[in-house]
Amino acid sequence: MGKVKDKILGDAAEKVRELKDEYLQKEESLRAVYDEGLKNSAMENEKKLKSLYDSEVRRLLAVRKLELRKNILSVKREIIRQLAESVKERIQGDPELYKKFIDKAVRSGVKTGTEEIAVSLKDRAMFTDEFMRHLNRIASEMIGGESSLRLADDETDIEGGVYLRSGRENFNASITVSVESAVTESEPELAVILFGGEN
């Protein structure tokens, strides 16, 4: 019986070795698959992270570029605003130019020839009888008949220029509104002159 027992134990030991070798081969094969999967997963994760990083960098650059353009536009608008202020000062600082401005306001705003001209307290002295006759001649040309513009009894709270009032209608030819309107209308041309083709 010893031989049978040894044979059984020998066969069992052989079977254990075979199973162990088979297990080790399967383990090695699974480990290789796992390692390859881990390597592929790490590469995919690295690609995803790089893609996310690149995307975030592009987004941040786009945001920064927009902020920069906004700041540049703000500075350009401030320059144009300062230009408008200097134009107002230039017009008001030159009595002959200022009278021409008032002439143009009357030409543009007179409708009936009976309007009342409202001005600021500081401009009131400029509207002498002679200047009023001059403005009435301009109004007569514009309406094609007799004109009777008159200086309003009350002062208007404006920096300069005039309001032409007739009943409920007002024509605002204040220096501020006139210059700002001209600047707004010609802002694209001003921008090209001042800043060239910059965007």
Image (cartoon, rainbow, N blue to C red):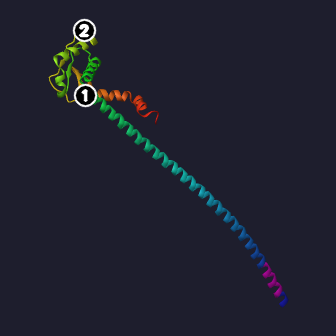
Around disc 2, counting alpha carbons within 10 Å, would you say few (fewer than 14), some (14 to 19), or many (20 or more)? few
Circles 2 and 1: CB atoms closer than 8 Å: no
Q: Which residue is mark 1?
A: 93
**In front of the other: 158 or 130:** 130
Range covered by the magenta-colored residues: 5-15
The vertical placement of 31 against 59, above or below, is: below
Residue 32 position by quadrant: bottom right
Q: Position of residue 83 (x, y in %)?
A: 33, 33
Q: Which residue lies at the image location 25% right of the left edge and 11% below the top edge?
A: 140
Residue furthest to the left = 153
Is any part of residue 86 visible from this angle?
yes
The residue that label 2 is drawn on is: 145
Amino acid on which disc 1 is placed: Gly
Which residue is found at the position 22% from the left and 14% from the top? Answer: 134
Q: Amino acid at mark 2?
A: Gly
Q: Residue at x 83, y 90 (%)?
A: 2
Query: Which sits in the foreground, 130 or 47?
Result: 130
